Every structure is written in structure tokens, then in C-alpha cells.
Image: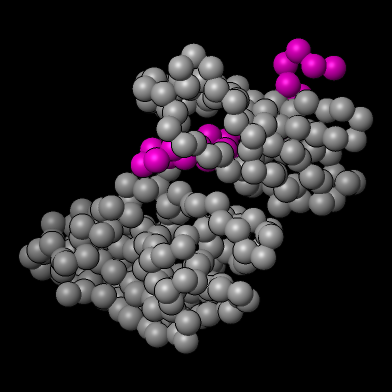
Amino acid sequence: MLRAFAGPEFSRIELLSASTAIGNGGRLLLGVRIEPKPGWKTYWRAPGESGLPPVFNFTAHENTALPQIEWPAPKRLMQAGLESYGYDGPVIFPFYVQPRDAAKPVRIEILVDYAVCLDICVPEQALLALTIAPGAAAMSQDRGALLAALGKVPRQQQDGGLHRITASGIIQEKQKFEYQVEAEADQGFKAPDLFVDGAPDLMFSAPRTSYSNARRRAIFSLEVRALNPSRPIFGQTVTLTLVDGESALEKQVKLAKRAGTE
């Protein structure tokens, strides 16, 4: 077992490794696992109307470059009439490290600030550290869970995917803005959801979804609310995260008027 553990009051948090040692010097899969108390939840990088996103601060990364945290696809959650995006059970935020020298240990130290919520939100903090020694590597008992978490991270949209976002644009009617996103699924959509983040002064509602072509085409319509009316909506870059069952993809777009509208 190769893991580091901390025990805040309302959750359990661990730093996991898929390998017991560095091995031949290839990429090493690690992850931060947060397990809120039963019935509690924690949050995605964009928490929605309530909650706080986890903040991962790598205070040390020896024999490797600064790691990049990956974000599993979130769920849409409701609390006291407010909508949030996150996880209603244990979640692993995976990341890779690449040893610079396979003959030296890799040491990771990470300070995690996050919130867990039931009826109220409670801030938690943990400092986790893990050293992976050089030498012959074996698979750890956490490898399966880390690979499963990696599989929940939305892929970047590429040509040929079974799901794809095909068009997007904003329809403006006086001071009201509606964002429409079109998507296709070769085998038909099951229960899709669409999240929009990346523009901190804009709020997007839950989508109204309409289907055509035997559910192989979907249009998501979201209301847009500007938190900073002085900043133009058009031209801002957002990330679209399309989730449908076990399938999830991301695509970055610039907000623009819907083609064919005034």
C-alpha cells in the first residue's frame, strides 16, 4: 500500500499512487481521494450556486514537473433550492507525474483546501505528502480505483467520437440571453446533461433539452445571467462539458451570437 492519509472532521482525504515504486521511469498515476461523510458532498472546479471548489496547491514536487489535476465529470446537485455541481460520494482527482530521473525518489506534497456540505458547508484542509522510491514497481491496491477515476475525466472532443458538440450560440432578446448548444450521439442520447464554466462572472441555468432524429440530436437551451453587467458576454471563452452516462467530453468555445439571429 502506498498512500498518505489525513482525517479532517467531516471527510477523509488520501493521496494515492497506482505504483509501489518508480519502476522504469514512465509516467506515474496518482490521485487525491476525498470521501465526505455519508450524505455530504463536495464540489467540482465550478461549484454552481453554492459551495467552494477544491484548491490543490502543490507545495513540493521533487524529481518531477508541477502536476496537473484532472476533474472527473460532475453531477448536478440541489441543496436548499440552490443548484451546485459536484460529487455526492467519494471522488478521486487523478493526476500524472513524470520522474526526471528514475534512480531518484519522487516526492509530492500537496495542500488541499475544499468544502463538504450537508445543510451547511464546512471548509476542510489537509496537507498530504507521498514519496515514491526508485526500484522495481508493482501495481498498488489503489490502481483500479485510480484508473476508474481517470475514465470519468471528460475527454477533449475529437473527430470521430460517439458524442460530439456540433454548434453553439447565444440568442439575445432585449436584455435576456439564451445559450443554445447542439450535440449529436451516434447511438442516441440517454440522459445527457451540459455544464458551462470558465467565465466567472456568468451564471448558466440547468439546460432545457429537446431531441430529434431518434434522440441522436439534442439541443440544450440555458439561460445566461451576467453577474457583472459591465463586461460583455460575447467573446468570453467557456468550457462545455457534455455528460451522458459514462460518456463525458469537453470543448472550449467563445461565446458568440447564434448564427441566423439578429
Q: Is residue 28 left or right of residue 261?
A: left
Q: Residue 183, percent across and down?
A: 53, 25
Q: Vertically, is 230 above or below 250? A: below
Q: Quadrant of residue 206?
A: top right
Q: Quadrant of residue 17?
A: bottom left
- Colouring used for the render: one colour
What residue is at 85 percent from the left and 44 percent from the top?
Answer: 231
Q: Residue 70, percent across and down?
A: 43, 54
Residue 6 on the magenta span: no
Q: Vertically, is 54 above or below 212? A: below
Q: Vertically, is 219 above or below 11? A: above
* Residue 238 vs residue 117, the one in the foreground: 117
Q: Is residue 139 left or right of residue 10?
A: left
Task: Give the residues in magenta.
Answer: 239-262
What residue is at 30 percent from the left and 62 percent from the top?
Answer: 30
What residue is at 59 percent from the left and 26 percent from the top?
Answer: 210
Q: Is residue 103 visible?
A: no
* Residue 109 vs residue 24, the one in the foreground: 109
Q: Is residue 208 left or right of residue 134?
A: right
What residue is at 55 percent from the left and 52 percent from the top?
Answer: 76
Q: Residue 74, percent across and down?
A: 49, 52
Q: Residue 126, percent across and down?
A: 46, 81
Residue 258 on the magenta span: yes
Quadrant in which the N terminus is drawn: bottom left
Quadrant in which the C terminus is drawn: top right
